[in-house]
Image (cartoon, rainbow, N blue to C red):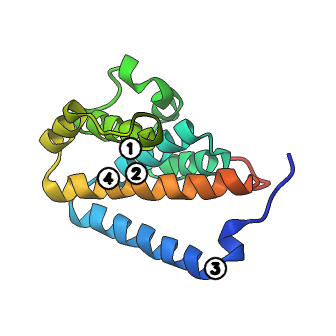
Amino acid sequence: MTTRIQLSSALPEARRAMVTLQSAIEKAAADAGLDQRLIELVKIRASQLNGCAFCLDQHSRDARNLGESQRRIVLLGAWRETDLYTEQERAALALTDAMTRLPQYQDVPDDVYEQATSAFTQEQYAVVAWAATAINAWNRLGVTSRKPLPTEPA
C-alpha cells in the first residue's frame, strides 16, 4: 500500500487543535464520571466502521492497557449479538454507529437518541457524542492519508 501525504504532519496547527479537542473530551469524560474504557470502545467501534487500521490498532492497545478484555474488543463488531456490554455501553455504541453512518442515513434515529439520553446524563451524552465526532475526524485523516501502522504490533 502506498502512503499518501500525511495530513496531520502537513498541517501541524490543525493536528494540535485536534489533540487539544481530544484532551478536552478525555477530561470531560473523567469529570462526567465516564469510564475511559467506554470512550475507547467508542473509538474502536467507529474505527471498525470507517476501516481505519491505524486507529483500530492504537485504540485496541489503549483499551487493553486500561484493562479491557481482548474478548470484548474482538466481539465489538458484533456488539448487538452479545450480552457482553452494559446498557450504557450499548447506548454509546448505538449512538456511535448512527453518528458514524450519518453520510449513509443522514439521521440519528429517535430511538437511538432516546436510548442514549436515558443511559447518560446530558453531560455524559455530550461527551460520548463529541468522542464519536472526534474519532470520526481522526479516522478520516488516517484513511485518507493511508497512515501506516507502527512497526510494533498492538
Disc 1: which residue: 99
Q: Quadrant of the N terminus?
A: top right
Q: Are marks 4 and 1 in contact (CB under 8 Å)?
A: yes
Residue corresponding to mark 2:
132
- Which type of secondary structure does the marked residue at label 4 adopt? helix
Amino acid found under the numbered disc labelled 1:
Met
Q: Which of the two discs, 3 and 1, labels the residue nearer the N terminus?
A: 3
| Label 2 element class | helix
State how far apart marks 3 and 2 are (Cα).
Answer: 22 Å
- Res 129 label: 4
How packed is label 4: few (under 14 Cα within 10 Å), some, or many (20 or more)?
Answer: some
Give the mark, 1 or 2, whose residue is nearer the N terminus. Answer: 1
Sequence-wise, which precedes: disc 4 or disc 1?
1
Furthest residue toward right: 2
Q: Quickly name the residue at label 3.
A: 12
Single out the mark in the foreground, 1 or 2.
Answer: 1
On the image, the x and y values in percent for residue 36 come to 36, 54
